[in-house]
């Protein structure tokens, strides 16, 4: 069979699978085996999604969550990046920080939530700090390995051509480490996205996608939960594809550090 | 999703800082202990300075005391045991289902076409977001917790097993077939060992993800015992020392999972078969 025909068959099967799952869900939801509040049919979910979007509540929840994620991620980059570079460049920094990092990293960020609630109360400070904790380690470790992985030949070549200090750092080390750093930001975002939802469930006060899902449980609003789940998935997916994809194209691909996968 | 990429999704920092050649054991120990001493000293001086209420910012002595108290009467052990049991139950379920599904997707085009879209839609949603839904469906307690852990760790396992099977070199398969291997032997002797490094990466990622959300799910699902519940329950009574003692145990278990379980397992299998350098 030709390649195009095989691809077409794959698409057909994928679509069939999705339709089949949706139909199965719908049949189960309508059969009345489970109460409709627990397993709402698809049109109900779609209506809830539309209604919550129209009255502005869902966009506002999403905005709050995004703010928290970006604040935490920004903090994590601001701390993790310089520390990672320091650790890669100076042995003393590595010797001091690495044992601490190895011990702190296996502690899930969400384990800190109750303590942070006591220290900082419910709301933004706690959620942002939890996101920060979750996102810092991937940032730091990827930067660290990225700077260490910069080809020493490049450093020596630039050095012998007279590059010193700042130029060496900005023109050789940063672009050289950039694929790792970008991977770090990506992983940090994935972690942050999980952490923010969990933190909002435990410590959210009145807005945020995690909070709305958890709050909906109290009122058995499974349709609200599903609608928020769709939004959470969509935002995560968009960030991964659009934001990081274009970031990658604008930086490391343009500098020729990595190539796009062949089609 | 993270495949076995450049710096995969660590649970524990790589390289426990190997000693320099000629460096004595004592120096290595002192060097590793030094940062903890500094951080401990800072913590202690802040706690003793009285800037924060002692109830909220306990001294190291208080933390150690509650740790001993909880450890001595077996309460801590019970909490830790239940948490680990849930982790293992969920993870075992995910490993069994995930590897089977992933391998099937790698081997049969039909399975791949049907399952891949479902996996790619499910993977980007953070597992913890499903918690309230699982609580509604399965009630509070152990069942939703274990199912969620399984659900969350299944995705990286499926994706890595799938790419592992697809990454087995075509030439090995053809060579084995040319030498007369039947389907079963082909699978056992060529495809499985060939895909194993990927499968291990998947298991590792799955375990790391499961570990990351288990504690939070325990807090939300009101399980009777468990470290997450210990920490969350302690909040009601302002027992900051109990919380910190619980966090220490959580960190220790996380560290042990990686160092004792996975590094060993890897050494015994894939490294021994020469699939991967140690």
Image (cartoon, grey):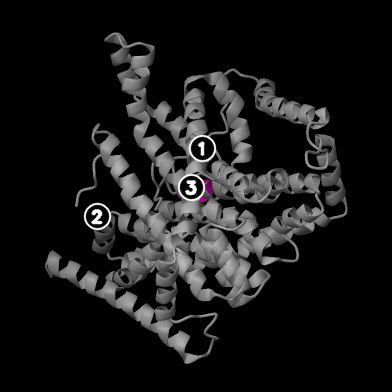
Query: In percent of the image, x 57 and y 42: which residue is there?
Result: A133
Q: Chain of mark 2?
A: B
Query: In percent of the image, x 51 and y 66: which residue is there?
Result: B151
Are the residues under badges 3 and 2 in a single subunit? no
Measured Cα–Cα span from mark 3 to mark 1: 14 Å
Q: Please say if B152 is above or below A122.
A: below
Name the N-terminal-most of marks 3 and 1: 3
Are the residues under badges 3 and 1 in a single subunit? yes
Query: In percent of the image, x 57 and y 70: which residue is there?
Result: A216
Q: Nearer the viewer, mark 3 or mark 1?
A: 3
Q: Quadrant of residue B42 in the image? A: top right
Residue at which label 3 appears: A67
Q: Chain of mark 1?
A: A
The residues colored magenta run B267-271
Callout 1: few (<14), some (14-19), or many (20+) C-alpha neighbours within 10 Å?
many
Q: Chain of mark 3?
A: A
What predominant SS class does the magenta segment belong to?
A: helix
Q: Please say if A197 is above or below A13.
A: above
Q: Position of residue A258 (x, y in %)?
A: 27, 38
- Residue B158 seen in this snapshot: no
Residue at which label 1 appears: A76
Q: Nearer the viewer, mark 3 or mark 2?
A: 3
Callout 3: few (<14), some (14-19), or many (20+) C-alpha neighbours within 10 Å?
some
Circle 3 SS class: helix
Most foreground residue, A131 or B6: A131
Residue at which label 2 appears: B171
């Amino acid at each position: 069979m030709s390649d195009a025909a095989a691809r077409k068959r794959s698409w057909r099967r994928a679509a069939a699978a999705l339709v089949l799952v949706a139909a199965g869900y719908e049949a189960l939801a309508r059969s009345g085996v489970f109460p409709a509040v627990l397993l709402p049919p698809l049109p109900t979910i779609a209506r809830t999604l539309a209604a919550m979007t129209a009255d502005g509540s869902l966009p506002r929840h999403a905005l709050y969550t995004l703010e928290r994620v970006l604040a935490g991620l920004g903090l994590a980059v601001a701390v993790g990046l310089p520390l990672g570079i320091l650790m890669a460049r100076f042995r003393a920094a590595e010797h001091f920080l690495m044992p601490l990092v190895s011990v702190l990293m296996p502690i899930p960020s969400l384990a800190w939530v109750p303590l942070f609630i006591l220290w900082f109360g419910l709301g933004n400070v706690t959620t942002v700090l939890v996101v920060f904790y979750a996102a810092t380690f991937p940032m730091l470790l990827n930067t660290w390995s990225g700077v260490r992985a910069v080809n020493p030949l490049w450093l020596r070549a630039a050095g012998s051509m007279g590059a010193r200090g700042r130029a060496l750092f900005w023109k050789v080390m940063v672009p050289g480490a950039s694929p790792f750093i970008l991977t770090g930001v990506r992983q940090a975002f994935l972690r942050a996205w999980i952490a923010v939802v969990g933190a909002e469930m435990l410590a959210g006060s009145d807005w945020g996608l995690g909070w709305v899902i958890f709050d909906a449980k109290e009122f058995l609003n499974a349709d609200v939960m599903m609608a928020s789940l769709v939004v959470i998935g969509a935002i995560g997916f968009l960030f991964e594809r659009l934001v990081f994809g274009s970031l990658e194209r604008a930086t490391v691909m343009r500098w020729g550090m990595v190539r796009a996968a062949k089609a | 999703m993270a495949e076995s990429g450049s710096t995969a999704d660590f649970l524990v920092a790589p390289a426990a800082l190997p000693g320099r050649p000629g460096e004595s054991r004592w120096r290595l120990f002192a060097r590793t202990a030094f940062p903890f001493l500094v951080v401990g000293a800072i913590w202690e001086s802040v706690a003793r300075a009285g800037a924060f209420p002692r109830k909220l910012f306990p001294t190291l002595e208080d933390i150690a005391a509650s740790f001993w108290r909880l450890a001595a009467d077996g309460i801590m052990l019970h909490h830790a045991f239940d948490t680990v049991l849930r982790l293992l139950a969920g993870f075992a379920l995910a490993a069994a289902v995930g590897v089977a599904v992933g391998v099937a997707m790698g081997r049969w085009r039909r399975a791949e076409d049907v399952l891949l879209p479902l996996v790619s839609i499910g993977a980007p949603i953070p597992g913890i977001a499903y918690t309230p839904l699982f609580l509604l469906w399965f009630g509070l307690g152990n069942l939703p917790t274990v199912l969620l852990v399984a659900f969350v760790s299944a995705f990286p396992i499926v994706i890595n097993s799938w790419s592992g099977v697809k990454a087995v070199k075509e030439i090995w398969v053809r060579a084995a077939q040319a030498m007369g291997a039947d389907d079963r032997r082909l699978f056992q002797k060529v495809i499985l060992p060939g895909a194993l490094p990927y499968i291990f990466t998947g298991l590792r990622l799955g375990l790391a993800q499961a570990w990351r959300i288990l504690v939070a799910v325990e807090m939300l699902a009101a399980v009777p015992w468990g470290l997450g519940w210990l920490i969350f329950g302690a909040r009601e009574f302002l027992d900051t020392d109990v919380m910190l003692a619980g966090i220490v145990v959580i960190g220790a278990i996380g560290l042990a999972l990686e160092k004792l379980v996975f590094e060993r397992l890897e050494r015994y299998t894939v490294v021994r078969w020469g699939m991967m350098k140690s």
